[in-house]
Amino acid sequence: MWFSRIAVSALALSLTCQTSLAQGGSGDWTRVQTLPAACKVSVKIKTGEKYYGELVSAAVDTLAIDSDEPAYPGRVIRRREFRRRDVQEIRLIRPARSVVTGAAIGGGVGAGIGVGLDATAKSHEYRGVIALVLGALGAGIGVAIAHHHPLISKRIYISR
């Protein structure tokens, strides 16, 4: 009974937060122009393509970023310029928060798997070691994923 109340409360809270975040997004291009150079941004254009990179410049009708893109072999930095009318959404990426969040999620998953494996062990001589090792491994994987696919961002601009 108490679990269902908590679940309903959490669902209601998450829906109100999403609504307020959606209303917080602005169609005001001046917010883009005031961003400092070299900050990490995500740009989604109206054709659906998404680019991540560092902001180079933001003028009245254009936006330029140095986009970090996959290439063979490895990754390559390409200068991308977008017209304002082609941009759907711009987000300010929070790389440090994304990496910490990725580490926490990965570490939690790894530790949870380790605790499950440790519970089935016949010998409890080294209790908790597998959880620690898998937690550290999971945190490392979470950091790597969050570094290339940021988890935390703030909407700066959305076209209307």
Image (cartoon, grey):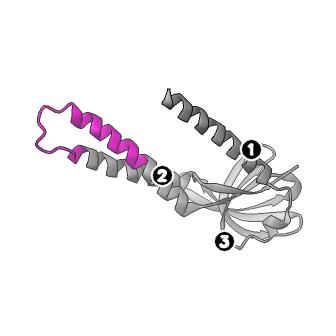
**Disc 2 marks which residue?**
102
- Magenta region, main secondary structure: helix
* Magenta residues (range): 106-130
Q: Residue at x 34, y 40 (%)?
A: 112
Q: Residue at x 33, y 44 (%)?
A: 111
Camera sees residue 47: yes
**Does 112 sit left or right of 54 as displayed?**
left
Residue 36 sits above or below residue 160 on the image = below
Compare residues 55 and 35 and report the one nearer the observer.
Answer: 35
Q: Are marks 3 and 2 in contact (CB under 8 Å)?
A: no
**Disc 1 marks which residue?**
19
Other-residue count near label 1 (Cα within 10 Å), few / some / many at <14 / 14–19 / ≥20: few
Gap between marks 3 and 1, in whole Å? Answer: 30 Å
Q: Amino acid at mark 2?
A: Gly
Residue 6 image position (x, y, % from top left): 54, 35
Other-residue count near label 2 (Cα within 10 Å), few / some / many at <14 / 14–19 / ≥20: many
Residue 146 image position (x, y, % from top left): 51, 53
Give the foreground label among 3 and 2. 2
